[in-house]
Every structure is written in C-alpha cells, then in structure tokens.
Amino acid sequence: MSFMEWAVQISVIAIGLSILIIFLRLVIGPAIEDRIVALDLLSANAIAFIAVYSIQKNTTTFLDVGIIVALLAFFGTVAFGYYLGRRGKQ
Amino acid sequence: MMDLISGIFLLMGSLFILLSAVGILKMPDLYTRMSATTKASTLGIGLVLAGTVVYWQDFGIASRAVAIILFLFLTAPVAAHIIGRAAYFGGVPLWEKTHINELPRNAPKEEPD
C-alpha cells in the first residue's frame, strides 16, 4: 500500500467522521442559525469529499459538481439569512 | 515525489476539516462556532483541492480547482456575515464570557435596510 493510497484512506475517514459530527450539531443545534451554519459546513465537506473521491476512483467527472455545490450552498445560506432578517421585523 | 506532496496536502486539509467539525460541536455559542468553521473549512478545502491539483497535474483540473477555491474564499466571509448579522438582530445570546461587544452602543433602534 503506497503512501498516496494510505493518505486517501485517512482523508476519507477524517471527512466522513467530520460529516457525522456536523450531523450531530445539525440535530441538537439550539437556534435555527446553528443549523444553517451546520448545513453550510456540510456542503463544504461534500466538496472536499468529491475532491478526494476523484483521486480514489481515478475519475475527474465529479469536480464539475463541486462548483455547483459551492454555488448552491452560498445561495442557500444567503436565502436563509434574508428570511431570518425578514422574520424579525414582523 | 509529487505523490508525497499531494498526500501531505490531503492529510493537512482533512485534518483542518476535522478540526472545523470538532469546533462546531465544542464551541460555546453561535459566533465562536462560525469563527471556527469559516476559517478551518475554507483552509481545509483549499488544501484538499491543492492536493488534487498536484496529483492530477492537468490544466482543466487546475482551473476547476482554482475556480472552486476562489469562489469559496469570496463567499464564505459574506455568508458568515449575513448569518451572524441575522442572528445578532434576531436575539441569539452571546457567550457569557464575551466581554467586548461594541454594537449595542451604536445600534439603531430599527434594523436598517
């Protein structure tokens, strides 16, 4: 087992573990803002997972998906923030 | 040689991502949580994508990775600012040991648009 395969295995394990921990915060988060931050971080972890997956499976197709995921995460966060700002006024 | 550099980048990036996940679980209130996750996750994703670029050594992959990194570095502070502002005006409490809070002195009565 070469160093590269070992590093990819460790990275997959670390990113999967962090996705589990973020799901914990998504479940127990006391305010709705905590859950929005957790969702934002989940999509960031999805991008990192896509990058590691492209090395592990020797395909580069899914790197395009990473751009779309980053765009959708930003728009989702902005929409949630706008909704929360509107909610305080009424 | 390139495999070594790429593996080191991947390991450092996944370590930073794991640190941001621990930060979002262990930090005491929303604002410190956002501080931990925004910094660590942008740095972690940047390092993982840099490892991908070093592994593939292809111009198309490099341009896609640079596009993702630039987009994340531009949008992560904006998203964190929007969520933090909405949370502060929405009444999410601060940690009790936070002793610098400069906003209430100058805060307007109504949230301006």
Image (tube, coloured by chain):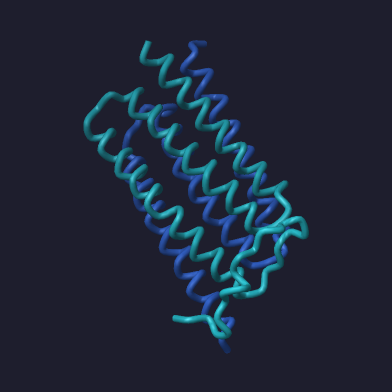
Residue at 54% x, 24% y: name it. A9
Q: Nearer the viewer, residue B71 or A53?
A: B71
The residue sitting at the left extreme is B59
Q: Quadrant of residue B47?
A: top left
Q: Quadrant of the N terminus of chain B?
A: top left
Residue at 28% x, 33% y: name it. B62
Q: How many marks?
A: 0
Q: Nearer the viewer, residue B76 or B53?
A: B76
Q: Position of residue A21 (x, y in %)?
A: 67, 45
Q: Nearer the viewer, residue A88 or B101?
A: B101
Q: Quadrant of the C terminus of chain B?
A: bottom left
Residue at 35% x, 49% y: name it. B71
Q: Position of residue A24 (x, y in %)?
A: 70, 51
Q: Quadrant of residue B21?
A: top right
Side of B75 where A7 appears, left or right: right
In the displayed structure, would residue B94 be above or below residue A47? below
Side of B54 where B105 appears, left or right: right
Chain B is shown in which shade?
A: cyan
Q: Position of residue B12 (x, y in %)?
A: 52, 27
Residue at 22% x, 31% y: name it. B59
Chain A is shown in which shade?
A: blue
Q: Position of residue A83 (x, y in %)?
A: 51, 76
Side of B62 where B93 appears, left or right: right
